[in-house]
Amino acid sequence: MQRRSFLFSSLAAPLAAAAPIVPGQKPRLRSAICAYSYRDALAKKTMTYDDVVKAAVDNNVDGLDLTVYWFPTTADSFLIPLRGFAYRNGVDIYSISVRTNMCQATQPLRDKEFSDVKHWVDVAAKLGAGHIRVFGGTVPKGGSEDEAAKWVMDVLARGAEYAGKSGVILGLENHGGITSRAERIVQIVKQVNSPWAQVNLDTGNFDKDAYQQIAQILPYTANVQFKTEIRTEGGKREASDWDRLTKMLATGGYRGYMALEYEAKEDPKAAMPKLLARLNELARKYSA
C-alpha cells in the first residue's frame, strides 16, 4: 500500500525521475515495420505473421513491431515457431503492440488491466521482444483527467514492476485520451519512476503542435512509430517531415527503432517499399 500511496500523491509534487535517453550520446537508429501496416491482409488472413517477417527481409529492415490483434493464439505452438522463423531470417521481433485502457475507476477493473499486461509481458518474453506498446485509455464520462492519471499510474507502475523482471519495457503511447498532450505523458512516466515504463512515440497522433510535443516526450522514448502525416500548429494535417524527425531523434541521442506504421490509402504492398527505403536512408544518414 505504501507504493500505491506514493503514486496517488499530489500530481503537483516534484518529479525527479531521470529520462532514459542520455543527452549528447551518439545515436543508433534502426528501421522497422509495424505489423499494423498490413492490418487488412492480416485480418482477412491473406497474410500471415511469417509473411510480415518476409516483408522485413524483402525491404532490408532490421526489426518488427508486431501488433498482436490478429495473433491466431498466444500459445507456444504459435509464438515459438514465429520467434525461430524471425531469427533464422535475421529479423528482430523487438516489440509487440497491444490494446489497454488503464483509465479504470475501480480497483477490480485496474487489477484486470494489470492481469492483461502481465499476459502480454509473458508473450513478449517468449518472442524475445524487449518492448510493449500500451495505451493509457480514455477518461470516463464524469471523471477528471487528474484522477484518471492516477489510475493509469497504478496500472503502469505495477505493470512495469512485473515487466522489468523479464527485461521488458512498457511504452506508453501518445494515443489520444489521457495521453493527448505531451505534458501529461511526461508527468505520468516521471511519477511512475521506473526504467521499465517509458514512452512509445507515435509521430502522427498528436492533434496539433506535433513537432513541439514530440520534442517534449523524446527524452523518455523507447520506441518510435513513423507515420506519413503529422499535425502542426492549429491542428493542420500535412506530410510528415521525416528528415526533421530523424534529426530530432539523432540530436536527442535516441538509440532504437524507427518503425513505419502505414495508414494511408494506397495498397501497403505498393507504397511501403518506397517509404521503407527512405527510412533506411535516414537511419544510415543520422546514425553514429
Image (cartoon, rainbow, N blue to C red):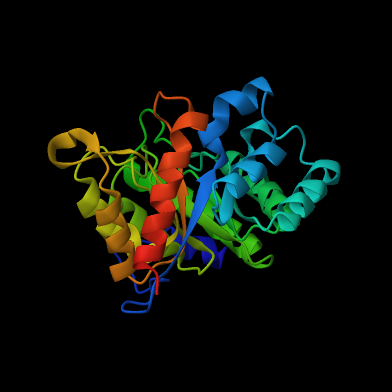
Q: Nearer the viewer, residue 69 or 7?
A: 69
**Which residue is rendered at x = 70% and y = 33% of the image?**
48
From where the camera sits, is residue 115 visible?
Answer: yes
Residue drawn at point x = 59 percent, y = 45 percent: 58
Out of 46 and 108, give the one closest to the viewer: 46
The residue lying at 54 percent from left, 56 percent from top is 170
Find residue 132 and report its horizontal and vertical position in percent: 57, 52
Q: Quadrant of the N terminus?
A: bottom right
Q: Quadrant of the C terminus?
A: bottom left
Taking the image as shown, residue 71 lies to the left or right of residue 144, namely right
Number of callouts: 0
Image-quadrant location for residue 29: bottom left
Where residue 177 appears, as percent x and y from the top left, is 37, 37
**121 displayed left or right of 63:** right
Tell me where residue 138 appears, x and y as whole percent: 41, 35
Quarter assignment of residue 62: bottom right
Q: Nearer the viewer, residue 270 or 180?
A: 270
Instruction: Look at 39% across and 72% down and name the residue there.
Output: 27
Instruction: Please state if 142 lies on the left or on the right of 244 as rendered.
Output: right
State left or right for residue 67 relative to residue 248. Answer: right
Residue found at the far top of this picture: 44
Along the line of sight, the residue nearer the viewer: 187 or 121: 121
Q: For residue 154, say whether it is visible.
A: no
Q: Residue lying furthest left in this view?
A: 234
Residue 166 drawn at (x, y percent): 69, 65
